Image: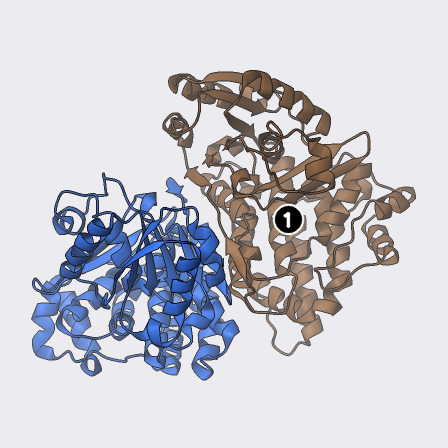
Chain colours: A brown, B blue
Amino acid sequence: MLGNFTYENPTKVFFGRGAVENLKEELTRYGKRVMLVYGGGSVKKNGIYDAVREQLAAAGKEVAEIAGVMPNPTIQKLREGITLARAHRADFILAVGGGSCIDYAKALAMSIHEEEDPWEKYFVRFEDPACEVVPVGCVLTMVGTGSEMNAGSVISDPEKKEKRGKAFADARLFPRFAIMDPAYTMTLPRYQMVSGIYDMFNHICEQYFSGIDDNTSDYLAEGLLRSVLHASRIAVRNPQDYEARSNLMWDATWALNTLIAKGKTTDWMVHMLGQAVGGVTNAAHGMTLAAVSPAYYRHILPYGLPKFKRFAEAVWDVDPTGKSDRKIAEEGLQAMETWMDELGLAKNLTELGASEDMIPDMVRGTLILDGGYKVLDAKEIAEIFRESL
Amino acid sequence: MLGNFTYENPTKVFFGRGAVENLKEELTRYGKRVMLVYGGGSVKKNGIYDAVREQLAAAGKEVAEIAGVMPNPTIQKLREGITLARAHRADFILAVGGGSCIDYAKALAMSIHEEEDPWEKYFVRFEDPACEVVPVGCVLTMVGTGSEMNAGSVISDPEKKEKRGKAFADARLFPRFAIMDPAYTMTLPRYQMVSGIYDMFNHICEQYFSGIDDNTSDYLAEGLLRSVLHASRIAVRNPQDYEARSNLMWDATWALNTLIAKGKTTDWMVHMLGQAVGGVTNAAHGMTLAAVSPAYYRHILPYGLPKFKRFAEAVWDVDPTGKSDRKIAEEGLQAMETWMDELGLAKNLTELGASEDMIPDMVRGTLILDGGYKVLDAKEIAEIFRESL
């Protein structure tokens, strides 16, 4: 049954080739003092930085920069940014990059006017901001996290070996706008492309594999999953296929912009397992999810059989004729693994640098959630990690 | 290929049982002088009017009323409303009703501060508003049109026998919020429920049956169509099934809130044909669409064969084994007609009050669009109407 919910998504999206041309006019809605946030040197090499700088100049903005935002943005980097943004008296934050960069910009947006320590308030106590939130906009260059159209933010403390985040409830944390030019994602290495594809695929699964109802969200999730399969198969053969890359970009946005979770419970255990792997290795986020997924889903299949059967038929076109529900469901997971092989995703934790002796640490590092078909205990988690080696 | 587009949908939705309880707090964001817009007496009989009035009183609003907004709201009624709203110096409009009521509220919102004649400016020249637009909110009581989360408005001039409208581009015309309580739709007569179901189903089809690309929008459309089929089959057996009614309510919103048209061309010829029928009869909108759809889709099937084949397999689970594409596609349309029979939809124009001698008028009343698989000429339109009798 569709439970009660509120839906609100204020992000304005400019999508397509040359979308950055909208930046100048869109920026006229916001203040003069812009904090430009980006990562490493790639946006400088591929011309995106220059294109954005040109728009900022044309809009007459006073710009200060926070460069070097890393893949898992740290609380130390956040503190550095807060100091810079306060000194600049920033009244707008523009993030140019992927999910990490946008996550960082949101954390910054709610910290500039906050007197308390942001780590404690937002990433330990998980409170929503009570202070003024500086508006954020973004130019997306990497596909997968969905951060361009949600209020989620994840920040890490490498000293404590902690990675913490949540989907905040405050609509002020959604990017006010997102510039989404699929051509901007084409220079990404293949490894990161497929890692992003599995990330978006799994975002949909995490919301789909929970609950027993046939609600609108489940049907939308199936449509998105089929779109990801179709476009990803084209993109792995030809990463320069604009159509496929543009569909993947839009799929990723809707995979995690709150819509397909409305009215239902959600799981998110694959992400909890994957993050624990991330805590002990340097593996790409999407690859950690890929490595633990098959064992996890095989483990919970008996507890969510009707949904896994539905998944097999509606997403993978498994022919049910003359088969038991269990058999149909298992064929669905087999089809998923075949597709994962086509993409060249990580097949096990060993290739990501994890080993048997790290399992106790990974088990301790796994936050146990209760929205899925089976609430795991420590023994089951260890088993799933072992099977995933 | 996903073409360039802008996506922006600022409507905040409060969904579920008791959603009206959010009204008081949400209204604090807007001005004191509220124009309350509603239709006939049904909202007074079923208690919705009282619940809304209670919230308005608790929020301390000064309320004036425009009652009696009819199913196809007229320009004459709009002029009456403009006078009332100006006299009240309204700074917020609250619509309580279905699509007609919300369409009317939007037309009012962009006319209060407009000096030009609204019919000429908005519904003949189809311009977007340049004046101040009064914010609109809505409490939805009828499902189908999607007006609760888009910027569309349709107004009629019965004297000229014209019904005109469009999806305006101005984001200020989206309702700021929509209160969506599925229980509010349960008192609706069965005839109106199924008419609304076909309306939402066809909204999806109008956007789906155009273009040759496998883009995200097409996959989302298929997910929504499957959701409509599933929930509608439950709802016709038991209209009091809250789960089915709630899914239908949410399906209808996403069927026409701009998402599934993004990056693609659209058709809308069934609506053009249906509106021409509406010009000469008093038939319910959804029923006019139902009566002309089978003949129209059979007519254009050869021109859009790959999409009709896809429709058959992805939406109706037609087994393609050993069949020609044409055969698969035709079986899809047969399955659609079987479902339409299950719902008890109008099967022909005769039962809606149209007859052979009205065909020339209906042909003249049909606006020809060019986004579908075949641009119709007058002879083809006459043929489709004749087959639909």
| Above or below, A16 relative to B315 | above
Residue sitting at 74 percent across and 37 percent down?
A283
The chain containing the residue under callout 1 comes to: A
- The foreground one among A72 and B120 is B120
| Above or below, B175 relative to B132 | below
Residue sitting at 67 percent across and 31 percent down?
A71
Instruction: Indicate the quadrant containing the N terminus of chain A: top left, top right, bottom left or bottom right.
Output: bottom right
Label 1 environment density (alpha carbons within 10 Å; few <14, some 14–19, many ≥20): few
Percent x, y for residue A225? 56, 55
Percent x, y for residue A120? 73, 35
| Above or below, A168 relative to B352 | above
Q: Is residue A264 left or right of residue A247?
A: right
Residue that badge 1 annotates: A342
Task: Please identify the residue farthest to the right as the structure is shown.
Answer: A357
Q: Tell me the amino acid under the disc marked 1.
A: Glu
Percent x, y for residue B87? 20, 51
Element class at badge 1: helix
Residue sitting at 39 percent across and 77 percent down?
B187
- The foreground one among B179 and A200 is B179
Residue B322 visible at all: no
